[in-house]
């Protein structure tokens, strides 16, 4: 999942000088991740007695690394468990199909940097409904469409590359027209860089805010949450 296991490029020679720059360390710094974790806890009012579902837990760098108090269930498409700590239980599964969980089974559902990668669009809609079904409260973090650095490609405005922009611009038209079936079959779709109002429509009872993951908005997120 994005930001869980980013790898930076090899050192490059710029202007005749060898410049060492660890993109993964800069974009995914522990300080930035901890600050975002604290913000998440503040927004949903996380308490130690809350049972948490982490949808798309990955390696746990965004949430589990900072939490040893809550009972956490981690759901991920990758069948390999990558988080090992006493308060964590792993479940291999799909965010769009969480029938194994009861309605409002969790006090808080967390999903960080995951939903923009759920494809096709119909599965994304299912996943958002499932998050709202199984959680009394939820908080979702996705990239802001106007982030200066695309966190997936690590390129400046990488989300607006001709290929990416053509794909999500086409999707906006299809979503706006209500043509959900066509939106499912956009060739080569890999990311859902939706605008704030589209995310808001998928989580109609939520509050959406813009959040700067790195200073000066180099990486900017949308945080979508509902507090019980």
Image: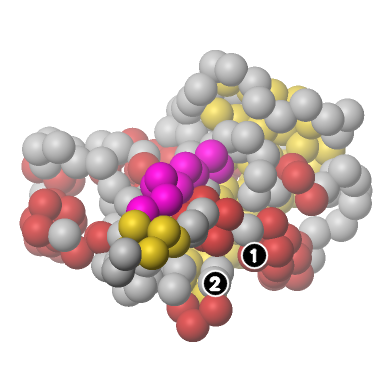
Which residue has dot 1 on it? 32
Count up the numbered dots: 2
Residue at (32% x, 64% y) in the render:
16
Q: Choose top left, top right, bottom left or bottom right for residue 196.
A: bottom left
Query: Residue 64 placed where, x, y %?
Result: 74, 43
Q: Secondary structure at mark 2?
A: loop
Is residue 32 toward the left or the right of residue 193 in the image?
right
Query: Residue 160 placed where, x, y %?
Result: 19, 64
Is residue 217 toward the left or the right of residue 154 in the image?
right
Is residue 165 toward the left or the right of residue 18 in the image?
left
Q: Nearer the viewer, residue 202 or 148?
A: 148
Q: From what the image shows, is residue 31 above or below residue 6?
A: below
Query: Residue 185 placed where, x, y %?
Result: 12, 36
Residue at (65% x, 21% y) in the render:
81
Which residue has dot 2 on it? 214
Which residues are drawn in magenta? 4-12
């Amino acid at each position: 999942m994005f930001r869980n296991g980013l790898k930076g490029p090899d050192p490059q020679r710029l202007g005749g000088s060898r410049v060492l720059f660890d993109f993964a360390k800069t974009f995914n710094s522990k300080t930035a991740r901890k600050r975002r974790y604290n913000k998440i806890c503040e927004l949903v009012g996380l308490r130690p007695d809350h049972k948490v579902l982490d949808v798309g837990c990955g390696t746990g760098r965004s949430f589990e690394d900072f939490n040893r108090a809550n009972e956490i269930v981690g759901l991920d498409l990758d069948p390999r468990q990558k988080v090992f700590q006493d308060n964590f239980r792993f479940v291999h599964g799909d965010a769009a199909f969480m029938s194994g969980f009861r309605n409002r089974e969790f006090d808080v559902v967390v999903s960080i940097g995951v939903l923009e990668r759920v494809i096709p669009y119909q599965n994304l809609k299912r996943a958002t409904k499932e998050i709202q079904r199984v959680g009394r409260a939820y908080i979702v973090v996705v990239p802001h469409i106007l982030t200066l650095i695309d966190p997936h490609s690590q390129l400046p405005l990488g989300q607006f590359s001709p290929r990416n922009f053509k794909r999500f611009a086409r999707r906006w038209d299809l979503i706006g027209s209500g043509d959900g079936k066509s939106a499912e079959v956009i060739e080569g779709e890999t990311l859902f860089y939706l605008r704030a109002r589209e995310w808001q429509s998928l989580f109609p009872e939520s509050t959406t805010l813009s959040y700067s993951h790195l200073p000066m908005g180099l990486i900017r997120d949308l945080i979508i949450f509902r507090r019980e």
